[in-house]
Image (tube, coloured by chain):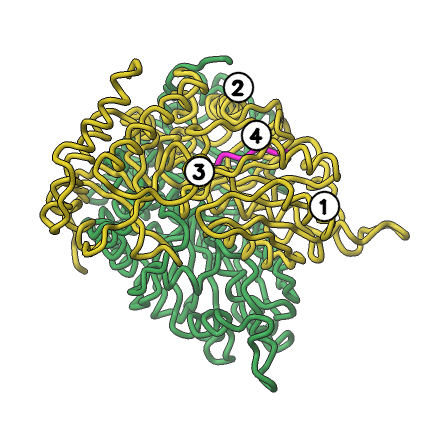
Chain colours: A yellow, B green
Amino acid sequence: MTTFATFNPPQRLLMGPGPINADPRVLRAMSAQLIGQFDPAMTQAMNDTMALYRSVFATENEATFLIDGTARAGIEAALVSLIEPGDTVLIPVFGRFGHLLREIAERCDANVETCEVPWGRVVDPAMIEEAILRTRPKLLATVQGDTSTTMCQPLAEVGRLCREHDVLLYADVTASLGGNTFQADAWHIDAVTAGLQKCLAGPSGSSPVTFSPRAVEVITRRKSIEAGLRADGETAAATRIRSNYFDVAMLLDYWGERRLNHHTEATSMLYAARECARIIVEDGLAETVERHRLHGEAMLAGVRGLGLVVFGDVTHKMNNVVGVEIPTGVDGDRARGQLLDQFGIEIGTSFGPLHGKIWRIGTMGYNARTDAVLTTLAALEQVLRRNGHLTPHGGGIDAALEVYGSTAS
Amino acid sequence: MTTFATFNPPQRLLMGPGPINADPRVLRAMSAQLIGQFDPAMTQAMNDTMALYRSVFATENEATFLIDGTARAGIEAALVSLIEPGDTVLIPVFGRFGHLLREIAERCDANVETCEVPWGRVVDPAMIEEAILRTRPKLLATVQGDTSTTMCQPLAEVGRLCREHDVLLYADVTASLGGNTFQADAWHIDAVTAGLQKCLAGPSGSSPVTFSPRAVEVITRRKSIEAGLRADGETAAATRIRSNYFDVAMLLDYWGERRLNHHTEATSMLYAARECARIIVEDGLAETVERHRLHGEAMLAGVRGLGLVVFGDVTHKMNNVVGVEIPTGVDGDRARGQLLDQFGIEIGTSFGPLHGKIWRIGTMGYNARTDAVLTTLAALEQVLRRNGHLTPHGGGIDAALEVYGSTAS
């Protein structure tokens, strides 16, 4: 057998679209020793976590808990629990993660309808209303912030339209939660899923979720109606949820008072998720969003100060990530490699139609900090210079500092 | 908003059927800072992890990697990727986790056949061969060690039978791997899934898995054949995998050379999984199993030395857990509560037909240690005495020490 040394990862400043560096407090929380899954201290930690995420999601939903997997696990849990085969699902697509929602909904055997806009824009509510009237969906599924394009879809109006037309609304807020205003209850959003590895400043591997009473009713109706148990005349529409692991009806009995055994809770990830939310609640949710706005604005000013062209509709940009066009004559992947190898700084490449054209630079979670922004801009200026692209000397730093100077940073 | 303090879990000695205390080296590994998911250091850590689990599973399978979720996520990934609706799946049931396999296979719309024995026994290979001939399954799905009964199903003969009759064989080794002999290749097992929280001495939340070339062929055949793309006359049997998150065909492209983006890897859990396997490979796989055998034998002798009656067919007991009958007149849950509250020691209750009748005491992973065994026996003696059940004074300790005395402990 080959033997291996203990892993000693290199020090990186992760300024891409996520994952980013975890807050050291989260790593410390994860280093605590394990306890049993029905230990009173454990069930208390679970209850704390539910309460904390109600604050983070701005909801009163009792059904607020964690899915034990990455953000994508949360998406699939919501969709497979809400969608029955043949249901019509409407998906506004304005980037890669809209396509992901479509792909998952298709695997649930939904009848998927989309309304699509070019990458770099958000979807107009009028377009969504037209699509609702045309397709009469059971569920509208959308992302809030799509890191592939940096766009942040306004959801308040979408929520109002969905409620008016009696459509369930699901939002994936993985990339946006904590860094951009989000209000599950005020915006009438019935199901929401997230991840820790963006503005929540934790590692990937746990997905906070919340479900409104409307969504819970749809899901629990599917709980016990199995083939052979259905009464005569009872509708056969309420089909069993296809996944055991992602069966939200069962998970509600696991996180709820009944404490019915399901999976063995991922204890260390629970510790992480609890600490991520605890820090946000301690700092204040609005203050956390404002911190992301400030450092996002500084980074935006900084890349413009370097003469770089910003991608997309900037008025709808997420606070926590910016897309910049790779200057003509610069090999984007080579420059990113130099940033990583020489400065230990990671920025993001892009997917699909933007690959090779756009870099994505994040300022989120633990890395929404002045030193992280300025260090990245200083290193980027040098890498651009060494790749033959001269920028205004110190133009990024000066522009960012001007943003900080006008605000209490 | 209610604020919360940093979570400070109480110190517990977890001597139930799992989860158990994590090895401190695993917790330290998890406290390392994050790196980007396509950082060369990250992809190297992923490759290391694949190599390490090949050693732990005793396999040459290239397709050896992690599912980002608990052990149950690994089970569902294997079954949903292998089973197409209508496939016949044969499941030997000898405890709770056989029922879980049945429940998951049913949600995959398999035609499920079972052969069942009373709890506390394993299944005779002749019974399995008879069932194979009767049901002609595509897949036989079984657990190796079922903690609900403490039984360890012998698999070498089952593997031989499955190969002879051209049946795919899946084994859930969550509870047994590392603590009991297991050989994926030598025993012809096509798909295997595990978890970290038992003999591997880590936290729940990552599921090591391995797939034989035979299994990979079945799974990858389902990769690209989507509705509308099927050629005339091509069989429609190879249906798309119903889950995106658990799509092993996609996960192979994520962990393999193509590095196609899928989920965002749960980095801290990868660190944990890597360290769990690294420790076993460093200590030696056979030596790790032998350590579990020794401490399991000491615990078995100890509970017998206390005059307790051991549950089930002891010749087929897993090394790492023992079931003991709760003495008449003792309230099992009250005594367990006293062990936890007064001594900080957790032992397990039981499920289903054994609830209230049997305690389950584990000696696994980091807690397969002399001090953990002796401390548990000493405390159990006192709790039994305080509950009115007199045991031979020191009988448990003497019997356990006799096992240790005759061996290099």
Q: Determine whether the residue tagged by mark 4 lies in a helix, strand or loop.
A: strand
Q: Amino acid at mark 4?
A: Thr
Magenta stretch: dominant secondary structure: strand
Residue A166 x, y percent position in the rendering: 75, 39
Same subunit: marks 3 and 2: no
What chain is tagged by disc 4?
A
Residue A210, magenta (yes or no)? yes
State the CA–CA distance, disc 1 to disc 3: 26 Å
Which is in the foreground here, disc 1 or disc 3? Answer: 3
Q: Residue furthest bottom?
A: B233
Quadrant where the N terminus of chain A sits is: bottom left
Q: Which residues are magenta?
A: A207-211
Marks 4 and 3, the one that precedes in the sequence: 4
User: Circle 1 sits on which residue?
Assistant: A222
Same subunit: marks 2 and 4: no
Marks 3 and 1: in contact by CB < 8 Å? no
Determine if residue B144 is in view.
Answer: yes
What number is the disc on residue B387? 2
State the CA–CA distance, disc 1 to disc 2: 45 Å
From the viewer's side, name the closer residue of A374 and B136. A374
User: Circle 3 sits on which residue?
Assistant: A195
